[in-house]
Image (tube, grey):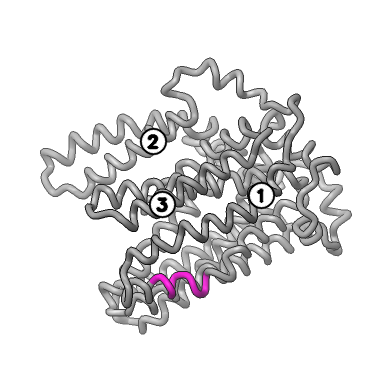
Amino acid sequence: MEEGVGELLLQDRVGGQVGDQAGQRPAAPMALGMLVFAVGCAVAGAAGSWPLFLLGRFGQGLGVGAVMAMAYTLIGLAYPERLRARMYALLSSAWTLPSPAGPAVAGTAADHVSWRAVFALMPPITAVAAVLTLPPMRALRPAPADAPADTADTAVLPWWRRPLVSAVLLTAGTGVLLQALLLENPAALVPLALVGLVVTVPALRWATPEGTLTARRGLGAGVVVRALLCGVCFGSEAFLPLGLRELRGVAAAAAGLGLSAGAVTWVVGSALQARRDDAGGGRVAATVAGFAVLLAGVALVAVTVLTDLLPPWAAPAGWAVGGLGMGVAFNASTTATLGQVPGTGRARRARRSSSPRRSPPRWSRAWAARPSPSAATTAGRRGPRCWGCSS
Protein backbone atom coordinates (compact mmCIF):
# COMPACT_ATOMS: atom_id res chain seq x y z
CA MET A 1 0.00 0.00 0.00
CA GLU A 2 2.86 2.42 0.77
CA GLU A 3 4.21 1.88 -2.75
CA GLY A 4 0.84 2.58 -4.33
CA VAL A 5 0.23 5.72 -2.25
CA GLY A 6 3.71 7.03 -2.98
CA GLU A 7 3.31 6.47 -6.69
CA LEU A 8 -0.15 7.98 -6.94
CA LEU A 9 0.77 11.08 -4.97
CA LEU A 10 4.08 11.76 -6.67
CA GLN A 11 3.52 10.59 -10.24
CA ASP A 12 0.97 13.13 -11.47
CA ARG A 13 2.34 16.27 -9.87
CA VAL A 14 5.83 16.05 -8.40
CA GLY A 15 7.15 13.65 -11.01
CA GLY A 16 5.70 15.76 -13.81
CA GLN A 17 7.13 18.94 -12.29
CA VAL A 18 10.54 17.32 -11.86
CA GLY A 19 10.32 16.06 -15.45
CA ASP A 20 9.67 19.59 -16.73
CA GLN A 21 12.31 21.27 -14.58
CA ALA A 22 14.91 18.55 -15.21
CA GLY A 23 14.25 18.43 -18.96
CA GLN A 24 17.86 19.20 -19.80
CA ARG A 25 19.04 16.19 -17.76
CA PRO A 26 16.19 13.65 -17.80
CA ALA A 27 18.49 10.84 -16.70
CA ALA A 28 19.10 12.49 -13.31
CA PRO A 29 15.59 12.12 -11.80
CA MET A 30 15.30 8.62 -13.27
CA ALA A 31 18.60 7.59 -11.67
CA LEU A 32 17.55 9.12 -8.36
CA GLY A 33 14.24 7.26 -8.43
CA MET A 34 15.98 3.95 -9.13
CA LEU A 35 18.46 4.57 -6.32
CA VAL A 36 15.74 5.43 -3.80
CA PHE A 37 13.75 2.35 -4.82
CA ALA A 38 16.77 0.05 -4.45
CA VAL A 39 17.68 1.50 -1.06
CA GLY A 40 14.07 1.17 0.08
CA CYS A 41 14.04 -2.50 -0.92
CA ALA A 42 17.28 -3.12 0.94
CA VAL A 43 15.99 -1.39 4.07
CA ALA A 44 12.68 -3.28 3.99
CA GLY A 45 14.40 -6.61 3.43
CA ALA A 46 16.84 -6.11 6.29
CA ALA A 47 14.36 -4.48 8.67
CA GLY A 48 14.24 -5.88 12.18
CA SER A 49 11.27 -3.80 13.28
CA TRP A 50 7.94 -2.70 11.89
CA PRO A 51 8.79 1.07 11.74
CA LEU A 52 12.00 0.32 9.82
CA PHE A 53 10.09 -1.92 7.42
CA LEU A 54 7.57 0.87 6.82
CA LEU A 55 10.43 3.27 6.16
CA GLY A 56 11.79 0.94 3.50
CA ARG A 57 8.38 0.53 1.91
CA PHE A 58 7.94 4.28 1.89
CA GLY A 59 11.24 4.59 0.06
CA GLN A 60 10.05 2.03 -2.46
CA GLY A 61 6.94 4.06 -3.11
CA LEU A 62 8.88 7.27 -3.65
CA GLY A 63 11.29 5.55 -6.03
CA VAL A 64 8.57 3.86 -8.06
CA GLY A 65 6.66 7.14 -8.26
CA ALA A 66 9.67 8.98 -9.67
CA VAL A 67 10.52 6.22 -12.15
CA MET A 68 6.97 5.90 -13.46
CA ALA A 69 6.55 9.66 -13.71
CA MET A 70 9.77 10.01 -15.68
CA ALA A 71 8.78 7.13 -17.97
CA TYR A 72 5.61 8.97 -19.00
CA THR A 73 7.45 12.31 -19.13
CA LEU A 74 10.09 10.88 -21.43
CA ILE A 75 7.43 9.65 -23.83
CA GLY A 76 6.18 13.23 -23.95
CA LEU A 77 9.71 14.48 -24.56
CA ALA A 78 10.61 12.03 -27.30
CA TYR A 79 7.41 11.32 -29.28
CA PRO A 80 4.75 13.37 -31.06
CA GLU A 81 1.18 13.15 -29.80
CA ARG A 82 0.00 10.73 -32.47
CA LEU A 83 2.53 8.06 -31.40
CA ARG A 84 2.14 8.29 -27.64
CA ALA A 85 -0.72 5.82 -27.29
CA ARG A 86 1.47 3.16 -28.92
CA MET A 87 4.33 4.02 -26.59
CA TYR A 88 2.07 3.71 -23.54
CA ALA A 89 1.09 0.27 -24.82
CA LEU A 90 4.77 -0.58 -25.26
CA LEU A 91 5.46 0.62 -21.73
CA SER A 92 2.71 -1.67 -20.44
CA SER A 93 4.16 -4.58 -22.40
CA ALA A 94 7.32 -4.29 -20.30
CA TRP A 95 5.29 -6.09 -17.64
CA THR A 96 4.54 -9.06 -19.91
CA LEU A 97 7.61 -11.13 -19.08
CA PRO A 98 7.81 -10.52 -15.32
CA SER A 99 4.08 -10.46 -14.67
CA PRO A 100 3.35 -14.18 -15.15
CA ALA A 101 6.34 -15.25 -13.06
CA GLY A 102 6.95 -12.35 -10.66
CA PRO A 103 4.08 -12.75 -8.17
CA ALA A 104 4.33 -16.55 -8.25
CA VAL A 105 8.09 -16.45 -7.65
CA ALA A 106 7.62 -13.97 -4.81
CA GLY A 107 4.98 -16.17 -3.21
CA THR A 108 7.15 -19.27 -3.57
CA ALA A 109 10.15 -17.46 -2.06
CA ALA A 110 8.04 -16.29 0.86
CA ASP A 111 6.72 -19.82 1.46
CA HIS A 112 10.01 -21.74 1.12
CA VAL A 113 12.84 -19.27 1.84
CA SER A 114 11.84 -16.00 3.49
CA TRP A 115 9.87 -12.91 2.68
CA ARG A 116 13.18 -11.04 2.90
CA ALA A 117 14.37 -12.82 -0.24
CA VAL A 118 11.71 -10.98 -2.26
CA PHE A 119 13.22 -7.62 -1.32
CA ALA A 120 16.80 -8.85 -1.73
CA LEU A 121 16.13 -9.63 -5.40
CA MET A 122 15.13 -6.06 -6.24
CA PRO A 123 18.41 -4.07 -5.97
CA PRO A 124 20.34 -6.26 -8.49
CA ILE A 125 17.43 -6.10 -10.94
CA THR A 126 17.29 -2.32 -10.49
CA ALA A 127 21.02 -2.07 -11.22
CA VAL A 128 20.59 -3.96 -14.49
CA ALA A 129 17.67 -1.70 -15.46
CA ALA A 130 19.79 1.38 -14.75
CA VAL A 131 22.61 0.15 -16.97
CA LEU A 132 20.17 -0.49 -19.82
CA THR A 133 18.11 2.70 -19.61
CA LEU A 134 20.18 5.59 -18.28
CA PRO A 135 22.85 5.91 -21.02
CA PRO A 136 20.35 6.30 -23.93
CA MET A 137 18.40 8.88 -21.93
CA ARG A 138 21.35 11.26 -22.03
CA ALA A 139 20.56 11.93 -25.71
CA LEU A 140 17.29 13.63 -24.72
CA ARG A 141 18.53 17.17 -24.05
CA PRO A 142 16.04 19.94 -24.87
CA ALA A 143 17.53 23.28 -25.85
CA PRO A 144 18.03 25.84 -23.05
CA ALA A 145 15.27 27.96 -24.55
CA ASP A 146 12.83 25.16 -23.76
CA ALA A 147 12.89 25.84 -20.02
CA PRO A 148 9.28 25.77 -18.79
CA ALA A 149 7.60 29.09 -18.28
CA ASP A 150 6.05 27.95 -15.01
CA THR A 151 9.47 27.70 -13.34
CA ALA A 152 9.36 31.39 -12.49
CA ASP A 153 5.83 31.04 -11.14
CA THR A 154 6.93 28.17 -8.91
CA ALA A 155 9.86 30.19 -7.59
CA VAL A 156 7.59 32.93 -6.19
CA LEU A 157 5.26 30.52 -4.40
CA PRO A 158 5.56 30.15 -0.61
CA TRP A 159 7.79 27.20 0.20
CA TRP A 160 4.90 25.15 1.61
CA ARG A 161 2.97 25.43 -1.67
CA ARG A 162 5.76 24.30 -3.96
CA PRO A 163 5.20 20.93 -5.68
CA LEU A 164 7.60 18.76 -3.70
CA VAL A 165 6.67 20.17 -0.29
CA SER A 166 2.94 20.06 -1.01
CA ALA A 167 3.18 16.44 -2.17
CA VAL A 168 5.06 15.49 1.00
CA LEU A 169 2.39 17.25 3.08
CA LEU A 170 -0.29 15.42 1.12
CA THR A 171 1.41 12.09 1.77
CA ALA A 172 1.80 12.84 5.48
CA GLY A 173 -1.77 14.09 5.87
CA THR A 174 -3.18 11.07 4.07
CA GLY A 175 -1.14 8.75 6.27
CA VAL A 176 -2.40 10.44 9.44
CA LEU A 177 -6.00 10.26 8.22
CA LEU A 178 -5.75 6.56 7.32
CA GLN A 179 -4.12 5.78 10.66
CA ALA A 180 -6.90 7.63 12.46
CA LEU A 181 -9.56 5.52 10.74
CA LEU A 182 -7.95 2.40 12.20
CA LEU A 183 -8.48 3.57 15.76
CA GLU A 184 -11.43 2.32 17.79
CA ASN A 185 -11.41 5.00 20.49
CA PRO A 186 -13.47 8.00 19.29
CA ALA A 187 -11.54 10.30 21.61
CA ALA A 188 -8.39 9.61 19.62
CA LEU A 189 -10.00 8.97 16.23
CA VAL A 190 -11.80 12.29 15.84
CA PRO A 191 -8.95 14.73 16.63
CA LEU A 192 -6.40 12.70 14.66
CA ALA A 193 -8.74 12.53 11.66
CA LEU A 194 -9.30 16.29 11.83
CA VAL A 195 -5.55 16.87 11.82
CA GLY A 196 -5.24 14.65 8.77
CA LEU A 197 -8.00 16.52 6.95
CA VAL A 198 -6.55 19.94 7.82
CA VAL A 199 -3.23 18.91 6.28
CA THR A 200 -4.58 16.85 3.38
CA VAL A 201 -7.21 19.12 1.83
CA PRO A 202 -5.03 22.23 1.28
CA ALA A 203 -2.06 20.08 0.22
CA LEU A 204 -4.26 18.28 -2.32
CA ARG A 205 -5.26 21.64 -3.79
CA TRP A 206 -1.61 22.78 -4.02
CA ALA A 207 -0.21 19.50 -5.35
CA THR A 208 -2.68 19.03 -8.21
CA PRO A 209 -3.38 21.08 -11.34
CA GLU A 210 -5.93 23.86 -11.08
CA GLY A 211 -9.48 22.56 -11.35
CA THR A 212 -8.71 19.07 -10.05
CA LEU A 213 -10.82 19.32 -6.87
CA THR A 214 -13.84 20.40 -8.90
CA ALA A 215 -13.10 18.01 -11.78
CA ARG A 216 -13.03 20.95 -14.15
CA ARG A 217 -13.36 20.07 -17.80
CA GLY A 218 -9.97 19.35 -19.36
CA LEU A 219 -6.80 18.68 -17.39
CA GLY A 220 -8.45 18.72 -13.94
CA ALA A 221 -11.06 16.14 -14.91
CA GLY A 222 -8.38 14.00 -16.54
CA VAL A 223 -6.35 13.89 -13.33
CA VAL A 224 -9.47 12.93 -11.34
CA VAL A 225 -10.31 10.11 -13.74
CA ARG A 226 -6.76 8.71 -13.60
CA ALA A 227 -6.80 8.94 -9.80
CA LEU A 228 -10.09 7.03 -9.64
CA LEU A 229 -8.78 4.37 -12.00
CA CYS A 230 -5.60 3.89 -9.98
CA GLY A 231 -7.50 3.89 -6.70
CA VAL A 232 -9.87 1.16 -7.83
CA CYS A 233 -7.19 -0.95 -9.50
CA PHE A 234 -4.28 -0.69 -7.08
CA GLY A 235 -6.50 -0.66 -4.01
CA SER A 236 -8.16 -3.90 -5.09
CA GLU A 237 -4.87 -5.43 -6.22
CA ALA A 238 -3.31 -4.84 -2.79
CA PHE A 239 -5.96 -7.00 -1.09
CA LEU A 240 -6.39 -9.75 -3.70
CA PRO A 241 -3.56 -12.05 -2.54
CA LEU A 242 -4.29 -11.31 1.13
CA GLY A 243 -7.97 -12.10 0.71
CA LEU A 244 -7.31 -15.34 -1.14
CA ARG A 245 -4.87 -16.48 1.53
CA GLU A 246 -6.73 -15.41 4.65
CA LEU A 247 -10.34 -15.96 3.60
CA ARG A 248 -10.17 -18.74 1.03
CA GLY A 249 -7.05 -20.62 2.19
CA VAL A 250 -5.15 -20.29 -1.10
CA ALA A 251 -1.34 -20.68 -1.00
CA ALA A 252 0.78 -17.58 -1.57
CA ALA A 253 2.17 -18.84 -4.89
CA ALA A 254 -1.32 -19.56 -6.25
CA ALA A 255 -2.65 -16.23 -4.97
CA GLY A 256 0.15 -14.47 -6.84
CA LEU A 257 -1.08 -15.93 -10.11
CA GLY A 258 -4.15 -13.72 -9.81
CA LEU A 259 -1.96 -10.63 -10.03
CA SER A 260 -0.15 -12.15 -13.00
CA ALA A 261 -3.42 -12.63 -14.87
CA GLY A 262 -4.37 -8.99 -14.40
CA ALA A 263 -0.95 -7.74 -15.49
CA VAL A 264 -1.04 -9.72 -18.72
CA THR A 265 -4.54 -8.57 -19.67
CA TRP A 266 -3.60 -4.96 -18.82
CA VAL A 267 -0.98 -5.19 -21.57
CA VAL A 268 -3.56 -6.64 -23.97
CA GLY A 269 -6.05 -3.89 -23.18
CA SER A 270 -3.44 -1.18 -23.60
CA ALA A 271 -2.39 -2.58 -26.98
CA LEU A 272 -6.03 -2.76 -28.12
CA GLN A 273 -6.57 0.87 -27.12
CA ALA A 274 -3.43 1.93 -28.98
CA ARG A 275 -4.79 0.36 -32.18
CA ARG A 276 -8.17 1.95 -31.54
CA ASP A 277 -6.50 5.32 -31.03
CA ASP A 278 -4.75 4.92 -34.39
CA ALA A 279 -8.14 4.38 -35.98
CA GLY A 280 -9.49 7.61 -34.49
CA GLY A 281 -11.63 6.11 -31.74
CA GLY A 282 -12.80 8.52 -29.05
CA ARG A 283 -10.76 8.42 -25.85
CA VAL A 284 -13.71 9.41 -23.65
CA ALA A 285 -15.73 6.40 -24.81
CA ALA A 286 -12.72 4.13 -24.33
CA THR A 287 -12.18 5.42 -20.79
CA VAL A 288 -15.82 4.89 -19.84
CA ALA A 289 -15.94 1.40 -21.33
CA GLY A 290 -12.65 0.39 -19.75
CA PHE A 291 -13.73 1.70 -16.35
CA ALA A 292 -16.94 -0.32 -16.57
CA VAL A 293 -15.02 -3.50 -17.40
CA LEU A 294 -12.62 -2.83 -14.51
CA LEU A 295 -15.50 -2.43 -12.06
CA ALA A 296 -17.07 -5.66 -13.32
CA GLY A 297 -13.81 -7.51 -12.72
CA VAL A 298 -13.44 -6.05 -9.23
CA ALA A 299 -17.01 -7.07 -8.40
CA LEU A 300 -16.28 -10.65 -9.47
CA VAL A 301 -13.13 -10.68 -7.32
CA ALA A 302 -15.06 -9.33 -4.32
CA VAL A 303 -17.79 -11.94 -4.59
CA THR A 304 -15.20 -14.71 -4.88
CA VAL A 305 -13.02 -13.57 -1.98
CA LEU A 306 -15.74 -12.52 0.44
CA THR A 307 -18.22 -15.36 -0.13
CA ASP A 308 -18.25 -19.06 -0.96
CA LEU A 309 -20.58 -18.66 -3.92
CA LEU A 310 -17.77 -19.11 -6.44
CA PRO A 311 -14.62 -21.27 -6.46
CA PRO A 312 -11.31 -19.54 -5.62
CA TRP A 313 -10.10 -19.66 -9.23
CA ALA A 314 -12.85 -17.19 -10.16
CA ALA A 315 -10.86 -14.42 -8.44
CA PRO A 316 -7.92 -14.58 -10.89
CA ALA A 317 -10.44 -14.73 -13.73
CA GLY A 318 -12.15 -11.64 -12.39
CA TRP A 319 -8.85 -9.84 -12.04
CA ALA A 320 -7.99 -10.73 -15.62
CA VAL A 321 -11.23 -9.05 -16.70
CA GLY A 322 -10.42 -6.02 -14.56
CA GLY A 323 -6.89 -5.81 -15.96
CA LEU A 324 -8.26 -5.72 -19.51
CA GLY A 325 -10.50 -2.79 -18.64
CA MET A 326 -7.71 -1.00 -16.81
CA GLY A 327 -5.41 -1.33 -19.80
CA VAL A 328 -7.95 0.28 -22.10
CA ALA A 329 -9.03 3.03 -19.72
CA PHE A 330 -5.58 3.93 -18.40
CA ASN A 331 -4.06 4.20 -21.87
CA ALA A 332 -6.93 6.34 -23.17
CA SER A 333 -7.11 8.63 -20.13
CA THR A 334 -3.34 9.05 -19.89
CA THR A 335 -2.95 9.96 -23.55
CA ALA A 336 -5.79 12.44 -23.30
CA THR A 337 -4.71 13.97 -20.00
CA LEU A 338 -1.06 14.50 -20.95
CA GLY A 339 -2.27 16.01 -24.21
CA GLN A 340 -3.90 18.78 -22.16
CA VAL A 341 -0.67 19.90 -20.45
CA PRO A 342 -0.08 23.55 -21.42
CA GLY A 343 2.38 24.15 -24.23
CA THR A 344 4.82 26.05 -22.00
CA GLY A 345 5.94 22.94 -20.20
CA ARG A 346 6.18 19.28 -21.06
CA ALA A 347 3.93 19.45 -24.10
CA ARG A 348 6.01 22.18 -25.75
CA ARG A 349 9.24 20.27 -25.22
CA ALA A 350 7.55 17.11 -26.42
CA ARG A 351 6.75 18.74 -29.75
CA ARG A 352 10.26 20.11 -30.18
CA SER A 353 12.00 16.96 -28.97
CA SER A 354 10.49 14.99 -31.85
CA SER A 355 13.01 16.64 -34.19
CA PRO A 356 15.78 14.42 -35.65
CA ARG A 357 18.52 15.93 -33.45
CA ARG A 358 16.77 14.53 -30.36
CA SER A 359 15.25 11.37 -31.75
CA PRO A 360 14.29 8.40 -29.53
CA PRO A 361 16.03 5.02 -29.77
CA ARG A 362 15.64 3.35 -33.16
CA TRP A 363 13.96 0.17 -31.87
CA SER A 364 11.21 2.07 -30.04
CA ARG A 365 10.78 4.60 -32.86
CA ALA A 366 10.34 1.78 -35.36
CA TRP A 367 7.75 0.04 -33.18
CA ALA A 368 5.75 3.18 -32.49
CA ALA A 369 5.89 4.48 -36.06
CA ARG A 370 5.06 1.27 -37.90
CA PRO A 371 2.42 1.93 -40.57
CA SER A 372 -1.25 1.77 -39.72
CA PRO A 373 -4.27 2.10 -42.04
CA SER A 374 -5.30 5.41 -40.55
CA ALA A 375 -1.87 6.94 -39.93
CA ALA A 376 -2.46 9.87 -42.26
CA THR A 377 -5.87 10.55 -40.75
CA THR A 378 -4.54 10.36 -37.21
CA ALA A 379 -1.60 12.62 -37.99
CA GLY A 380 -3.86 15.22 -39.51
CA ARG A 381 -6.41 15.25 -36.69
CA ARG A 382 -6.50 18.36 -34.52
CA GLY A 383 -8.48 19.49 -31.52
CA PRO A 384 -8.89 18.38 -27.90
CA ARG A 385 -9.41 14.69 -27.22
CA CYS A 386 -9.77 14.22 -23.49
CA TRP A 387 -12.17 13.35 -20.73
CA GLY A 388 -14.36 16.38 -20.28
CA CYS A 389 -13.46 17.79 -23.72
CA SER A 390 -15.24 17.40 -27.01
CA SER A 391 -13.90 14.57 -29.16
The one nearer the camera, 157 or 337, is 157
Residue 146's spot in the image, x, y percent?
73, 28
Nearer the N terminus, badge 2 or badge 1?
A: 2
Q: Residues within 10 Å of mark 3 (few under 14, many from 20)?
A: some
Q: Magenta residues, as a range?
A: 99-106
Residue 290, located in which quarter of the rendered image? bottom right
Residue that appears at 12% across and 42% down: 186
Residue that appears at 39% across and 60% down: 119
Q: Secondary structure at mark 1?
A: helix
Q: Is residue 141 left or right of residue 250?
A: right
Q: Is residue 352 left or right of residue 207?
A: right
Q: Residue lying furthest bottom in this view?
A: 311
Q: Name the amino acid, label 2.
A: Leu
CA separation in Å, label 1 and label 3 = 23 Å
Between disc 2 and disc 1, the foreground one is 2
Residue 312's spot in the image, x, y percent?
36, 81
Q: Is residue 352 above or below residue 290?
A: above
Residue 93's spot in the image, x, y percent?
63, 65
Q: Name the amino acid, label 1.
A: Thr
Q: Residues within 10 Å of mark 2 (few under 14, many from 20)?
A: many
Between disc 1 and disc 3, the foreground one is 3
The residue tagged 1 is 335
